[in-house]
Image (spheres, grey):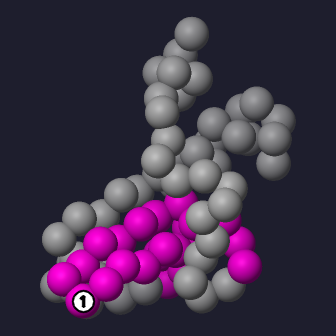
Amino acid sequence: MTELETKQWTLTANDRCDACPSQAYVHVKGVAGELFLCGHHYNKANKVKLEDFAFEIIDEREQLVQNRLKGDD
């Protein structure tokens, strides 16, 4: 088994991007709330402002690679 096959993800298909209906792969936790973002909207976001807002960023965009390798895209 590879590392990607054994990794336990915290974000699931039920987690949705706050900007669009896509699956969220990034969870940004901040003092004023939290954001769920798909890979596209996370890449598009102003990272400096996100880092100022966030005290934790859970980035599971590598799920996209795992799904592609398994043929689940």
Query: Where does residue 21 sit, x and y in percent of width and height?
Result: 72, 79
Query: Number of marks in the image?
Result: 1
Residue at the top extreme of this rendering = 1
Residue 39 falls inside the magenta stretch: yes
Residue pictured at 68% horizontal, 56% vertical:
13
Residue type beneath disc 1:
Ala
Residue 29's quadrant in the figure? Answer: bottom left
Residue pictured at 72% horizontal, 32% vertical:
69
Apparent side of residue 67 relative to residue 11 in the rendered image (left or right): right
Query: Where does residue 25 sit, x and y in percent of width and height?
Result: 53, 60
Classify mark 1: helix, strand or loop. Answer: loop
- Residue 68, placed above or below residue 46: above
- Residue 44, placed above or below residue 55: below
Residue 38 is at least partly visible in this image: yes
Q: Quick one: 40 or 21, which is closer to the camera?
A: 21
Residue pictured at 58% horizontal, 23% vertical:
5
Residue 33's quadrant in the figure? Answer: bottom left
Residue bearing mark 1: 32
Residue 63's quadrant in the figure? Answer: top right
Residue 37 falls inside the magenta stretch: yes
Apparent side of residue 22 relative to residue 36 in the rendered image (left or right): right
Mark 1, Cα crowd under 10 Å, few <14 / some 14-19 / many 20+, is: few
Query: Where does residue 15 sit, x and y in percent of width and height?
Result: 60, 64
Give the residues drawn in magenta, as a range: 21-44
